[in-house]
Amino acid sequence: MLTQIIAHRGSKGTRPENTLPAFEAALADGADGIETDVHLSKDGHLIIIHDEKVDRTTDGKGRVLDLTLAQLKRLDAGAKFDSVYAGTRIPTLDEVVQLLVKANFTGIFNLELKTNKIHYDGIEALVADYFNHHEVPFKLVYSSFYPKSIERLHALQPTAEFDSLFESKFKTARRLHAEHVIIGYHPDIRWVRRHWLLLPKVQLRPWTVNSERDMRFCYRHQFAGLITDYPGLAHRLRLKMQGS
């Protein structure tokens, strides 16, 4: 079985994370999937960024929740990574989707709802409504550390794929799997290394698999996928180990 390579926040290791250049690089690197994160702006726009605050990845300060789309668009999301990417902007969900549509991307689009710290009111309905009104060529996969978001989205989009994220405890993930809400687990690779022999036979896509050692581990055991900051490295190593 070919282990799918899913680019974590795009090609996060080589480009500013969760930006259009990062997603473009992931496609060029041969990634089978794109993983990214969605928040909600003050004026109700679906925003692609990892943190609840803009401080770490941009030249701005404050919570995404407290900033409008116009304010977010004025921030530089590239210069902190490298001056070459100065002027790179925070994208919206629609901008990322349109990039993938134009590239005729048919792989996995793993959208994580960042609702475990801030429970954005109505974000699940907005995401579901967006994809119900936009035909896309790729496979949509939802994940979240917040199980209620998974349950809400599952009620709105029962035909989509859902997977449970966790770092160390998988009691909730096991319950959601038993209830046929999710079909797979997205656990921390460190947790997987300690417990994988005890895991039930489910679809596994560990994160964040960045070292060659961890990549080889995933390929050797033929996990369904791996989530990595370095899709180019993962692709080269897979060619050697799995032949494709």
Image: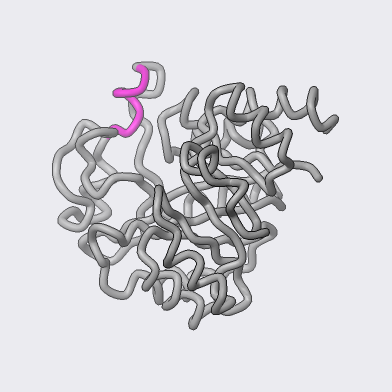
Camera-nearest residue between 243 and 231: 243
The x and y percentages for residue 228 are: 54, 35
Q: Relative to residue 127, is residue 192 drawn left or right?
A: right
Q: Quadrant of the C terminus?
A: top right
Is 240 situated left or right of 197 in this image? right
x and y, in percent, of residue 180 in the image: 59, 76
Placement of 49 over or under 228, stated as above or below: below
Residue located 31% across and 61% down the image: 115
Q: Residue at x 63, y 68 (%)?
A: 135
How many badges with numbers are in the image? Answer: 0
The picture places residue 9, in percent across and down from the top left corner, at 47, 40
Residue placed farthest to the front in the image? 198
Between 65 and 99, the residue placed more toward the observer is 65
**Residue at x 55%, y 23% (from the top left corner):** 211
Residues drawn in magenta: 76-82
- Which of the 4 quarters of the picture holds residue 4? top right
From the viewer's perspective, is 87 left or right of 19?
left
The residue sitting at the right extreme is: 243
Predominant secondary structure in magenta? loop
Residue 150 is inside the magenta segment = no
Among all residues in the image, which is located at the extreme top? 83
The residue positioned 40% from the left and 49% from the top of the image is 168
Relative height, residue 233 to residue 125 (above, below): above
Camera sees residue 133 = no
Front in this rendered view, residue 82 or 165: 165
In the rendered image, is residue 146 in sight? yes
Q: Quadrant of the N terminus?
A: top right
Whether 233 is drawn above or below 110: the answer is above
